[in-house]
């Protein structure tokens, strides 16, 4: 079985799925003392876990330690085997210098306490370290190798810092400096109007940000550069209980910006790159699948897949 903590990582593996989807992990797993996966032994998913000999979990460092512990309890129960992971071999891959578990409104200590190294299962992990960056070695590019070396030094806290400020100072040739948001967009996406239809060109670049609202602003500015008519799709937000509707009016619900959910007003144009946020039909349509909008109707969005083994296929969703 191939699992990953993020949707994008899952799409890069043959038959990959997000761990939360494949294992049916509880959404509030951090709040439960002894969580388990919601999988029946008679279900197809349960049968698959019973027969699996090797389970690969990519980007595992992003996962909460209780996710690993829930998986252990579930596998022992499904396989009727008291060994760790029910006797199955679990391969964890990741880098603790990257993103740790995200704990809302937490301190760095809370995030460290939630990571896999703080689990009682970590003592049973045999650690194998990769010593070569194969992507860099295969590229035979000295500039890329130098860039990767500096990133590794920063991650290992061996890069020299300014003795006065305690900050890292990078040379001007390390990266291109952008003074404004539009300048950043122009540097990452040069000649956008001429190139945005080139899927490979889009695949080679991305803008990262720490907050969703910054990402939204950048996306809106890039969307303006795409020629054609813009269409707006609005969500229908209601309370589950009609009695609560008085306390939470529709206008308030529309204003909420929930992680993992699109904004109330979804703005699109034909040719817009989009990303799927739900597991609709794994592994073809799963969280993290990237697509290009091909047609926009009143109730249907047609898009072409530009990632994974199903690249080039189209999908229609209401």
Image (tube, rainbow, N blue to C red):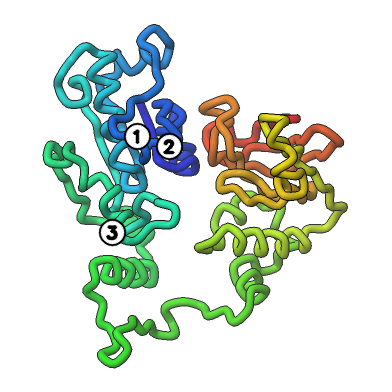
Q: Residue at x 49, y 40 (%)?
A: 7
Q: Say which quarter of the image contains residue 135.
A: bottom left
The percent coordinates of residue 236 (x first, y second) are: 76, 37
The numbered disc on residue 109 is 3
Q: Residues within 10 Å of mark 3 (few under 14, many from 20)?
A: few
Q: Say which quarter of the image contains residue 74.
A: top left
Q: Nearer the viewer, residue 49 or 142?
A: 49
The percent coordinates of residue 250 (x first, y second) are: 76, 44
Q: Residue at x 58, y 35 (%)?
A: 278
The residue tagged 2 is 28
Q: Of helix, strand and loop, which one carries label 3? A: helix
The numbered disc on residue 32 is 1
Q: Residues within 10 Å of mark 2 (few under 14, many from 20)?
A: few
Q: Say which quarter of the image contains residue 155.
A: bottom left
Badge 3 vs badge 1, beta-carbon distance below 8 Å: no
Spot the residue most to the bottom.
164
| Alpha carbon separation for disc pair 2 and 1 | 7 Å
Mark 2 or mark 3: whose residue is earlier in sequence: 2
Spot the residue most to the top.
42
Q: Of helix, strand and loop, which one carries label 2? A: loop
């Amino acid at each position: 079985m191939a699992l990953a903590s993020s949707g994008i990582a899952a799409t890069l593996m043959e038959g990959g799925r997000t761990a939360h989807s494949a294992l049916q992990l509880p959404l509030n797993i951090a709040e439960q003392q002894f969580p388990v996966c919601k999988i029946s032994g008679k279900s197809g998913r349960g049968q698959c876990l019973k027969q699996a000999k090797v389970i690969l979990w990519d980007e595992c460092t992003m996962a909460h330690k209780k996710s690993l512990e829930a998986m252990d309890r579930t596998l022992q129960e499904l396989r009727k085997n008291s060994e760790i992971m029910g006797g199955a071999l679990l391969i964890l891959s990741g880098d603790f210098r990257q993103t740790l578990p995200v704990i809302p409104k937490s301190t760095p200590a809370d995030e460290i306490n939630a990571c896999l190294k703080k689990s009682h299962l970590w003592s049973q992990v045999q650690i194998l370290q990769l010593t070569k960056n194969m992507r860099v070695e295969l590229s035979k590019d000295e500039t890329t190798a130098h860039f990767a070396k500096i990133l590794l030094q920063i991650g290992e806290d061996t890069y020299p810092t300014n003795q006065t400020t305690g900050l890292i100072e990078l040379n001007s040739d390390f990266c291109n400096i952008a003074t404004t948001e539009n300048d950043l967009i122009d540097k990452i996406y040069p000649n956008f109007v001429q190139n945005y239809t080139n899927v490979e060109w889009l695949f080679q670049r991305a803008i990262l940000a720490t907050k969703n609202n910054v990402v939204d602003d950048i996306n809106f500015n890039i969307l303006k550069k795409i020629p054609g008519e813009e269409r707006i799709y609005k969500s229908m937000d209601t309370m589950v209980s009609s009695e609560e509707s008085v306390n939470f009016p529709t206008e308030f619900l529309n204003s909420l910006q929930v992680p993992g959910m699109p904004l109330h007003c979804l703005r699109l144009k034909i040719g817009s790159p989009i990303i799927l946020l739900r597991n609709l039909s794994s592994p073809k349509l799963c969280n993290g699948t990237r697509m290009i909008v091909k047609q926009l109707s009143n109730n249907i969005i047609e898009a072409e897949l530009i990632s994974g083994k199903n690249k080039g296929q189209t999908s229609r969703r209401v």
